[in-house]
Image (cartoon, rainbow, N blue to C red):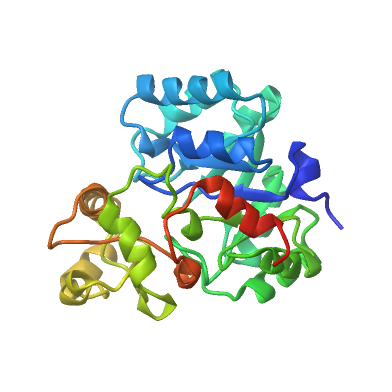
Amino acid sequence: MAITLDKLLGIDYPILVAPMFLISNTKMIKAALDSGITAAFPALNYRTDKELREAIQEIKAHSSKPFGVNLIVNKSNLKYKDQLKTLVELKVDFIITSLGSPQEVIEQCKPAGIKVFCDVVDLAYAKKVEALGADALVAVNNQAGGHAGKVSPKELVTLLTQNCSLPVISAGGIAFKKDIDEVMSWGAAGVSVGTIFIACHEADVSAEYKQAMIDYTAKDIVMTSKLSGSPLTVINTPYVQQLGTKATWLERLLNNNKRLKKYVKLLIAWKGMKQVEKAAFSATYKTVWCAGPAIEHVHSVRPMKEIVKQLTLDR
């Protein structure tokens, strides 16, 4: 069996607070580190290089415990090259790559002693990143929030652990310690947990978003392809119902045009993320809130340390 996440990073529990677009912040990262787990935030949560540097330096000043940063490594992230340069320079402990090839990230991080974890949704891509020299696989299953996979947690973890030699971090569907014990019994090295942390005191999202996490349940989570250019799980609010979750014929036509595809995806991602951003911090009629099926287990707004106890103590 591959090394577990707690041993790999030198933390108390094999738990990673997932990097969540617009939600993850320095308060959440610091609270996670203080609770004996690790956490990551998306580089795109910071608009400028100065803000990104300040966030990393603030966390490092608070704790020497390991934390990471998520990088979108495809063409939709126009800041990718500059963000990677900053993360290597400031020596973050690990980088999680998403939505593209991690080759350049691995090549730059290896000499700097920075670990690279790669989001994967299937075995074929897992084998590719393993060959490139990744340090761990983040197995994004069909219970994940945000950009979810298509395979069940057990099927994906089993497939990857039986065919790859890298540690497998299961992402999606985790709410309690028993869930962690179960995925570890399948061979996982640890877990990545996002949804149940959205309604924490440390998150800066609106009170309405946090209340929605309490009011809605797993049956209210739907997949939309209209926001980021990639399938995204969101709460099925009245506005999402009006908007629809399938791409229109024109969007499909443009997405399939080889010459225009890159620019169409950029436009869809930019427009969609602006919509999500507006909803996260204010209550409007046009509300799009990201979450996963683990929303079923969110019943109140609590401090992060209490949510961590839910993941580390038997109940």
Above or below for 280 versus 294: above
Residue at the (56%, 18%) spot, across then down: 61
Residue at the (40%, 75%) spot, across then down: 217
Residue 207 lies, in percent from the top left, at: 28, 52
Residue 232 lies, in percent from the top left, at: 37, 64
Q: Is residue 302 left or right of residue 212?
A: right
Name the foreground residue: 126 vs 172: 172
The quarter of the displayed image where residue 257 is located? bottom left
Above or below for 108 versus 198: above
Q: Is residue 181 left or right of residue 2?
A: left
Above or below for 170 versus 99: below
Residue 173 lies, in percent from the top left, at: 56, 68
User: Where's the C terminus, which quadrant?
Assistant: bottom right
Residue 70 in view in this figure: no
Residue 22 lies, in percent from the top left, at: 35, 45
Name the foreground residue: 182 vs 141: 182
The quarter of the displayed image where residue 244 is located? bottom left
The residue lying furthest to the right in this view is 1
